[in-house]
């Protein structure tokens, strides 16, 4: 165990930037405050198994190096794509993989759940916010109508006699959902033996907070009808933070209590069965001297980091100056949006923003960004980058209509100005609206040490002008011709 502790300490130091980034989120983001308990919970889970684990002998197991290499590769791929979540998954995965290397298959079979529970150290969940906003808004409007309150819904905005309510990111319920998932997985392991009961409890642990969040949002609107929006907001903050979801947890546990099928005196693992397992006997024969095992661990980790550093120095040549091109049938006009809108592209070498109009009065706003490379702090598809920046008056309401190779979003500002934005990513021969596909293409370039520029094009139009946003954007795309070639010409690649 001392060898494992030393190896873990060394890994945390080698990947200190990733652990520091995770710790910052645990401490400063209310969405991830529950993760501060995960190390203590993991220690408690191990302690529950200690009496049985003492009957098993650890061994250095060379196939554990394969697991270490896989975890390191995940980290490397995350570094290649400037994908923070993937880097953090790799950094945490290295802890479990190293345990497999240092302790061997038999001991790790007894520790499989605590080692797997370490996955909750990774702060994930931001990707769930938009769908949770939509689900909450639909639940809320249904309950609002059932309670006899006249209301209209526009994406995540609900208009009632008491005012306009937004199901904002903070109201999506994501923070309680991911905390409830972590709690649900823990209780499923500690309190249940039957896999069917475990699965049923996990379904309840996921569904309950989603439904409860819809009820909470409806309750805010219901109170606002008689007490006013300000009063309802204050009550919502207190109840949501301290009372309501504590009651939800209590209710979930109360409903599940009678189905708990693990007795208090039951051991969490059966060391006798693990010691007698023929499969573990065969696996454990692949032993390695501890010096060779730790040397292999160090070689894999340092090799992966060196590979990432070499790839990080790769960058494509980009022009010193760029300009928005002439578009047939359209002309440039002053950029004067009803409410200022400017996408974010931190780290890009070039950022262009302008407005085009045609003879019929249709207007389209064009944003273009060019990156010589993708790395930490300069991610085309990173959080807060693109059409909807967190520090702006704009809010997401719903996905827009499907457009080939694009991600379409409907935005609104101050509850009155609507905008449709289409985002296109371009690198190499790829044109896509998918951030994941962009990341995969960036990863491929880094693996091959092939420097290629990355481009972002956002076409947007406000509602309430001479034409619908959809029609204006379609007319503009027709005038530019194929957007992949148009974007390449702006970067002077053609």
Image: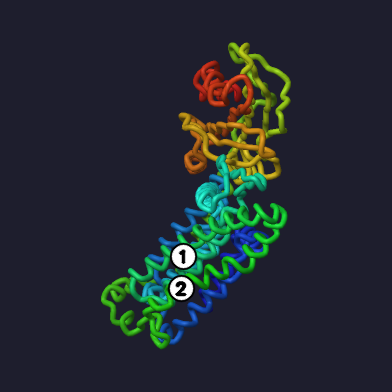
Q: Residue 285 location, x and y as percent?
A: 32, 73
472 relative to 228, above or below: above
How many numbered badges does the structure rendering display?
2
Q: Could you tell which of marks 1 and 2 lies nearer the N-terminus?
A: 2
Assign the C terminus to one quadrant of the image: top right
Q: Residue 439 location, x and y as percent?
A: 51, 42
Residue indicated by mark 2: 187
Q: Residue at x 61, y 27 (%)?
A: 461
Cβ–Cβ under 8 Å for marks 1 and 2: yes
**Where on the picture, by quarter, is residue 267?**
bottom left
Q: Residues within 10 Å of mark 1 (few under 14, many from 20)?
A: many
Secondary structure of the residue carrying tag 1 is: helix
Secondary structure of the residue carrying tag 2 is: helix
Q: Which mark is residue 205?
A: 1
402 relative to 150, above or below: above
Q: Residue 193 location, x and y as percent?
A: 36, 76
Q: Is residue 78 visible?
A: no
Q: Which mark is residue 47?
A: none
Kindly report which numbered mark, 1 or 2, lies closer to the viewer in this rendering: 1
**Where on the picture, by quarter, is residue 361?**
top right
Name the one closer to the observer, 56 or 65: 56
253 relative to 341, above or below: below
Q: Is residue 152 visible?
A: yes
Distance CA(mark 1)–CA(mark 2): 10 Å
Side (left or right) of 110 relative to 76: left
């Amino acid at each position: 165990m001392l060898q494992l502790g030393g190896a873990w300490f060394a890994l945390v130091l080698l990947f200190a930037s990733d652990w520091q980034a995770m710790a910052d989120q645990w401490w400063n983001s209310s969405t991830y405050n529950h993760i501060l308990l995960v190390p203590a919970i993991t220690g408690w889970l191990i302690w529950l198994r200690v009496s049985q684990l003492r009957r098993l002998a650890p061994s250095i197991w060379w196939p554990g190096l394969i697991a270490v290499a896989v975890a390191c590769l995940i980290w490397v791929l995350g570094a290649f794509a400037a994908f923070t979540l993937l880097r953090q998954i790799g950094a945490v995965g290295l802890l479990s993989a190293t345990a497999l290397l240092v302790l061997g298959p038999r001991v790790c079979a007894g520790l499989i759940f605590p080692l797997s529970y370490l996955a909750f150290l990774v702060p994930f969940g931001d990707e769930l916010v938009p769908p949770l906003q939509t689900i909450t808004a639909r639940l809320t409007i249904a309950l609002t109508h059932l309670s006899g309150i006249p209301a209209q819904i526009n994406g995540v905005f609900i208009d009632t006699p008491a005012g306009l309510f937004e199901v904002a990111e903070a109201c999506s319920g994501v923070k309680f959902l991911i905390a409830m998932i972590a709690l649900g997985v823990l209780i499923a392991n500690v309190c249940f033996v039957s896999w069917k009961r475990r699965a049923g409890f996990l379904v309840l642990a996921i569904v309950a907070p989603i439904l409860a969040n819809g009820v909470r949002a409806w309750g805010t609107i219901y109170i606002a009808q008689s007490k006013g929006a300000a009063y309802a907001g204050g009550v919502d903050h207190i109840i949501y933070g301290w009372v309501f979801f504590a009651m939800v947890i209590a209710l979930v546990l109360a409903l599940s209590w009678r189905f708990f099928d693990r007795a208090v005196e039951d051991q969490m693992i059966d060391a006798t069965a693990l010691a007698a397992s023929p499969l573990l006997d065969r696996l454990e024969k692949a032993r390695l001297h501890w010096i060779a095992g730790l040397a292999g661990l160090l070689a894999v980790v340092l090799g992966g980091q060196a590979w990432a550093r070499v790839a990080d120095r790769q960058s494509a040549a980009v022009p010193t100056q760029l300009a928005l091109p002439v578009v047939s049938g359209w002309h440039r006009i002053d950029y004067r949006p009803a409410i200022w809108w400017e996408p974010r592209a931190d780290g890009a070498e070039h950022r262009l923003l302008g407005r085009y109009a045609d003879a019929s009065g249709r207007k389209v706003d064009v944003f273009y960004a060019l990156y010589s490379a993708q790395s930490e702090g300069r991610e085309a598809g990173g959080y807060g980058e693109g059409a909807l920046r967190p520090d702006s008056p704009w809010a997401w309401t719903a996905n827009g209509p499907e457009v080939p190779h694009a991600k379409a979003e409907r935005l609104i500002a101050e509850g009155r100005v609507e905008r449709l934005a289409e985002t296109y990513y371009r690198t190499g021969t790829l044109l896509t609206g998918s951030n994941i596909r962009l990341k995969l293409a960036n990863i491929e370039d880094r693996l091959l040490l092939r420097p290629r520029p990355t481009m972002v094009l956002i076409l947007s139009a406000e509602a309430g002008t001479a034409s619908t946003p959809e029609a204006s954007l379609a007319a503009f795309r027709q005038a530019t011709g194929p957007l992949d070639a148009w974007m390449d010409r702006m970067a002077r690649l053609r």
